[in-house]
Amino acid sequence: MQRFRGQVYLKDGAIKQSDLIDGRHVVEADDDSWHLLVHDEDGTIAGCIRYQAHDVRNLFSRLSVFSTAIAACPQWGPALKQAVHSEVTTAKSLNLPFVEVGGWALAEHVRGTSEALRLGLAAYSLGQLMGGAVGMSTATRRHCSSSILRRMGGESLKYAGVPIPAYYDPQYECEMEILRFYSWSPNPRYTLWVDEIRQSLQQIPVIGSTAWALAAAG
């Protein structure tokens, strides 16, 4: 998965060869997240997305959204912090995890297809399967990724009713948006898709390390 993501990001110009470790795009969140993968008929990975569920009792400083370029902006950084705090408060009030979704990468032949939509909608399905989630995603405008997430039900993160604006990310060299979503309210036109994916997620193979398996069992 990390090699696939690295190849896609490198070809897009989002990262440099020096950003890869043995050909892999590695981020700290990978080890603490679920990863949903789409593969071709031959088993080759064609898409991936990362789903990181945080414990709302101990998460605020660990959120990756605070490492974004806009978080350091004197004008919008404080507004971003308050907007995120509001969403975390919502999660706490509902006794739900707060989720960050990222690491979305698609092979060229999958972009613009129903599989691309299904992979994004799987975040809603997984959230529902786990009892619900308040979520956030830092999404690129490259390949219309943020537009696709909006079509699924994502909305701009807001502070005092004012949307947090799109911003340029010098690390990935592209325009980015921060969107929020609730697992229980996808765009109604995709409700049946979300239901079908939720059912299928209960049947798919789950791969994890020995330590992960012991933690899940215990």
Image (cartoon, rainbow, N blue to C red):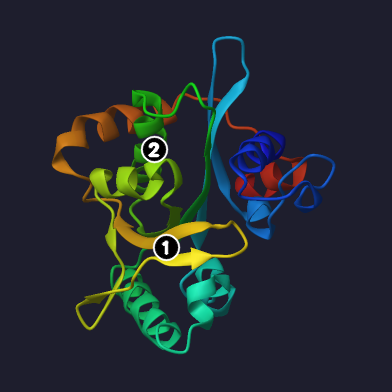
Residue 85 falls in image quadrant: bottom left
Precedes in sequence: disc 2 or disc 1: 1
Q: Measure how far apart labels 2 and 1 are at the Cα level.
A: 17 Å
| Above or below for 166 versus 120 | below
Classify residue 58 as left or right of residue 19: left
Above or below 47: residue 120? below
Residue 75, numbered circle: none
The spot of residue 202 in percent (x, y) is 43, 30
Position of residue 90 in the picture relative to residue 62 (left or right): left
Residue drawn 37% across and 43% down?
A: 144
Q: Is residue 84 visible?
A: yes
Tell me the number on the disc at residue 122. 2
Instruction: State whether residue 218 appears in this view.
Output: no
Residue that lies at the very extreme toward the left in this rendered image: 188
In the image as oriented, which residue stretches furthest toward the right? 22
- When the figure is inspected, residue 51 is found, relative to residue 58, above or below; the finding is above
Amino acid type of the residue that numbered disc 2 sits on in the rendered structure: Ala
**Mark 1, residue position:** 97
